[in-house]
């Protein structure tokens, strides 16, 4: 019955709306003015639809939460190891200054050294956010690295050249007496280098791993050259020494990777240490006008370079550095050397004193390296205003209340 009433009401409404229009259209065709529309009578048995009732309890939508300045309060144990609190305080200091990498390093150290500490508990979520937002993506990383095709290509290119060099050295050792033998040795060596670098790395290789193997090979060659000069070795014996030192360097790189798995930045820092230690040692001998014997010069440069490699590797453990930053610092050293010797040449175009020339080169190199290191001090630190924090510690009856606020 209610459905029928509703249908009747709808039909009546339609008739009321359409009735005058049809009458007006009919009389307009006859040229007579349309009569006033009749007033329809509402049926007696049709009830007016009830007015909709307002809902009794309508909850107001919750106000949107403010994304910034979120405050967290937690009861903490004041008797916990103060070293853990100190790490958290230092991490918050770094975070408040926008230094994400510094904060991340400190919070990771806190989680590793004090896993059950209350400071680790309250900082766990912040550590997860920092790990997600701070770890750089790509191949030149300060932290963990992912295998990449570019690193594999670098390894293949360098080891192909290494294989060709080994082929030439083998030819010198056996005294190849024909052009065909030389070409065959070079081709076979290059093919072996390419194959042995690509087959084991089908799933990719990290930048640090590839750079370590290539650097070990290069430093092995350099050590062989200097040792050959120091020992006054020539001919086929010299070629054998070079080949052996290259392979030994490659093996040392593989061994170091198994023990430490350094990043590309750490390997680059070790390379820079060896390069500049050996170069500065050579300039010192030049400043003394090479008064020492040739073997002494060669041995001292060799040992200085190797010690520089070890020193750079040790330094990279306390001062992480990216591969890109080492390139910039090395560029600063090269530019400083050129400015140093250039200044002397402008003053004394005829270069009357090798000592003064070399001393200016040393001063320029050291100044360039130091300046580039200082100017790139924030090269690997992402300083933005995205992160800020403030905190407070208040004593309570049960311990202490730590209040941490920040904008993320």
Image (cartoon, rainbow, N blue to C red):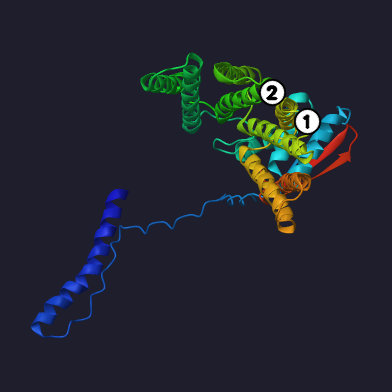
Q: Left or right: 203 with respect to 239?
A: left
| Residue 70 in sight | no
Q: In the rendered view, would you say 135 is above or below 348?
A: above
Location of residue 329 by image quarter: top right
Residue 87 visible in the picture = yes
Task: Give SS at disc 2.
Answer: helix
Which percent across, then down, holds residue 241? Answer: 59, 17
Kindly report the distance in space between the C-alpha atoms of the residues bearing marks 1 and 2.
12 Å
Residue beneath label 1, please?
292
Residue 341 placed where, x, y %?
71, 50
Residue that appears at 18% across and 82% down: 34
Within 10 Å of the Cα at label 2, are there few (<14), some (14-19), or many (20+) other Cα atoms? Answer: some
Question: First in sequence: mark 1 or mark 2?
Answer: 2
Query: Extreme bottom residue here?
Result: 32
Number of disc labels: 2
Q: Is residue 48 left or right of residue 124?
A: left
Q: Which residue is mark 2?
A: 230
- Indicate the position of residue 35 as horizontal and vertical percent values: 19, 81
């Amino acid at each position: 019955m209610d459905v029928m009433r509703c249908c009747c009401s709808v039909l009546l409404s339609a008739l009321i709306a359409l009735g005058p229009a049809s009458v007006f259209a009919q009389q307009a065709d006859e040229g007579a003015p349309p009569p006033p529309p009749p007033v329809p009578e509402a049926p007696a048995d049709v009830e007016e639809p009830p007015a909709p009732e307002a809902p009794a309890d309508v909850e107001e939508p919750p106000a949107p939460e403010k994304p910034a300045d979120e405050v967290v309060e937690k009861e903490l144990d004041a008797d916990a190891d103060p070293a853990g609190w100190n790490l958290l305080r230092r991490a918050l200091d770094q975070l408040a200054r926008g230094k994400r990498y510094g904060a991340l390093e400190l919070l990771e150290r806190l989680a590793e050294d004090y896993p059950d500490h209350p400071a680790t508990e309250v900082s766990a979520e912040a550590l997860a956010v920092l790990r997600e937002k701070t770890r750089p993506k790509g191949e030149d990383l300060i932290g963990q690295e992912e295998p990449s095709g570019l690193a594999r290509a670098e390894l293949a290119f360098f080891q192909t050249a290494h294989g060709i060099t080994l082929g030439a050295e083998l030819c010198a050792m056996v005294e190849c007496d024909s052009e065909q033998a030389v070409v065959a040795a070079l081709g076979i060596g290059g093919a072996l280098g390419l194959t042995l670098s690509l087959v084991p790395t089908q799933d990719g290789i990290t930048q640090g791993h590839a750079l370590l193997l290539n650097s070990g090979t290069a430093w092995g060659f350099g050590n062989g050259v200097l040792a050959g000069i120091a020992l006054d070795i020539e001919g086929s014996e010299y070629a054998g020494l070079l080949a052996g030192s290259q392979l030994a360097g490659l093996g040392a790189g593989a061994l170091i990777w198994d023990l430490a798995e350094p990043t590309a930045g750490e390997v680059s820092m070790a390379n820079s240490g060896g390069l500049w230690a050996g170069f500065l040692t050579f300039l010192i001998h030049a400043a003394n006008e090479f008064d020492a014997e040739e073997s002494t010069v060669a041995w001292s440069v060799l040992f200085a370079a190797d010690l520089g490699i070890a020193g750079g590797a040790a330094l990279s453990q306390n001062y992480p550095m990216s591969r890109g930053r080492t390139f910039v610092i090395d560029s600063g050293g090269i530019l400083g050397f050129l400015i140093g010797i250039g200044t002397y040449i402008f003053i004394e175009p005829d270069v009357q004193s090798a000592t003064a020339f070399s001393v200016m080169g040393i001063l320029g190199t050291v100044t360039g390296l130091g300046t580039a290191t200082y100017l790139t001090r924030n090269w690997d630190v992402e300083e933005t205003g995205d992160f800020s924090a403030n905190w407070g510690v208040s004593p309570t009856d049960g311990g202490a209340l730590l209040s941490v606020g920040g904008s993320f």
